[in-house]
Amino acid sequence: MSQEYDLIVIGSGPGGYVAAIRAAQLGMQVAVIEQEALGGVCLNWGCIPTKSLLKSAQVLDYLNHAAAYGIEVAQVRPNFKAMMQRSRDVAATMSKGIHHLFKKHKITVLEGRGKLLPNGTASVTTPTGATHLYRAQHIILATGARSRQLPHLPIDGSHVIGYREALARTTQPASIVIVGGGAIGCEFAYFYHTIGTKVTLVECSPYLLPLEDEDVSKQILKSFTQKGMQVYTAAEVTKVEVVQASPIVHIATQSGDLQIRSDLVLAAVGVQPNIENIGLEENGILMEAGKVAVDPYYRTSCNGVYAIGDLVKGPALAHVASAEGIICVEKIAGLTPEPLDYKNLPACTYAQPEVASVGYTEKSAKEAGYDIKVGIFPFVASGKAHAAGTPEGFVKVIFDAQYGEWLGAHMVGAHVTEMIAEVVVARKLETTAYEIQNSTHPHPTMSEAIMEAVAAAYGEVIHL
């Protein structure tokens, strides 16, 4: 045995590295096994680099519409290679930050592929093929997820790519078909359309962002269509064939089948957990619907083994994995953390307009049997939104009519991903409409729309 630790974490994404740091803060001797780069998919090939690209697109969008702000700008054109390089540079900077935090907290990094072995042991296979064994009283599995592949849409890395390949390109495609209208698909659709690529977006459900409130989904469809994207909902890609080095995408729509020739196809149909060859079967760890079964503190059926993030049931979101990691190690340390409230987790999409939501949708609230009050405040009635040139979208809130419980909030518009935290905290504190209406919001701000939407739910809205 090379070394024995209090805790070994397999995977250093936003679940794994946060769990490791919190454990070190609580006095544990911690090692993290990572086969690629600290920070995992989120930091290196997901959340952070994509937000960098989206910011580049937003700046370009502003410059293209500078005249609307009274500014004359000469020729503006995107530099795709430079955008991609900035994205990689941002990711690299953040990864260095994780290295610094690990050094600060005296966390050992074990480079290689990790696997759970019996009796509190983990193996690390290094890039050279050597295998080392390490022991720990507690082992957390945090191996994350990868692009989900459909049988009729295999990712070949050239003509059909996933999000990782999309973040490593150096040439801009003239046209792209994006399969999947969830958060990843909508974000890439906005990016590519804004920089001048012809975008076709295909979603199998009747709505873009199908997990969001229907009013939000309809607004995003309207926005994307007005921007000039070709969007097909309730449509399915049945086949992709490559003819003369160009993919031809076969799409079944409600009005008939069609074929689209494109430079590139991006598969954005979700993610699948990395559960293969990490030792689950050998240790008899129970599974549930393709994911690792855990209790509210992320203990698996194997004593001393835990699982968090994309491996377990729940939304595959970075901040969810981080919260799970903290709860897990605090329980290991003997503290009394509160189990995570999965009904109060915010979800964000960073296209333009942005989307942010938490809690029940109007439909799910009714299906749950609530008698509800709904308030909507459009940004077209917001002075700050008009001054910023972003009057698109709205804030929608949902309350239980009987007790005043804040059931949910759904926002679409500029900067709403920064606004949703107010609702998350308010719901955690069991805040009612009364407290929100009597909490003075600064003017002029986009956040005033939350107060106004709450007032609208109770028939007291002022500016509408």
Image (spheres, grey):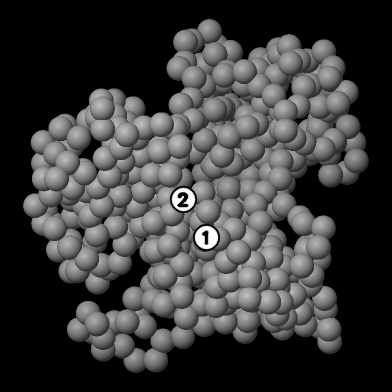
Mark 1 closeness class: few <14, some 14–19, many ≥20 residues within 10 Å: many
Residue at 47% of width from left, 15% of height from top?
337
Q: How far apart are the two marked residues, 2 and 1, measured between alpha carbons?
A: 9 Å
Q: Is residue 167 above or below residue 358?
A: below
Q: Is residue 140 above or below residue 94?
A: above
Q: x, y (%) of residue 461? A: 12, 49
Marks 2 & 1, CB-CB < 8 Å contact: yes
Compared across the picture, whether 298 is left or right of 186 comes to: right
Q: Which sits in the foreground, 143 or 211?
A: 211
Compared across the picture, whether 284 is left or right of 53 comes to: right
Q: Is residue 158 above or below residue 92?
A: below
Q: Which sits in the foreground, 124 or 303?
A: 303
Q: x, y (%) of residue 408? A: 35, 39
Q: Secondary structure at mark 2?
A: loop
Residue at 39% of width from left, 91% of height from top?
75
Q: Which sits in the foreground, 329 or 249?
A: 249
Residue 279, can we see it? yes
Residue at 59% of width from left, 41% of height from top?
316
Give residue 158's mark: none
What residue sits right under mark 1 in the picture? 207
Identify residue type, mark 2. Glu
Q: If the image is split into quadrants, where does the N terminus sit? A: top right
Q: x, y (%) of residue 365? A: 40, 37
Asked which quadrant contains residue 114, the reply is top right
Q: x, y (%) of residue 395? A: 29, 52
Identify residue type, mark 1. Tyr
Compared across the picture, whether 128 is left or right of 106 comes to: right
Number of numbered tags placed on the structure image: 2
Give residue 212's mark: 2
Q: If the image is split into quadrants, where does the C terminus sit? A: bottom left
Residue at 72% of width from left, 52% of height from top?
148
Q: Secondary structure at mark 1?
A: loop
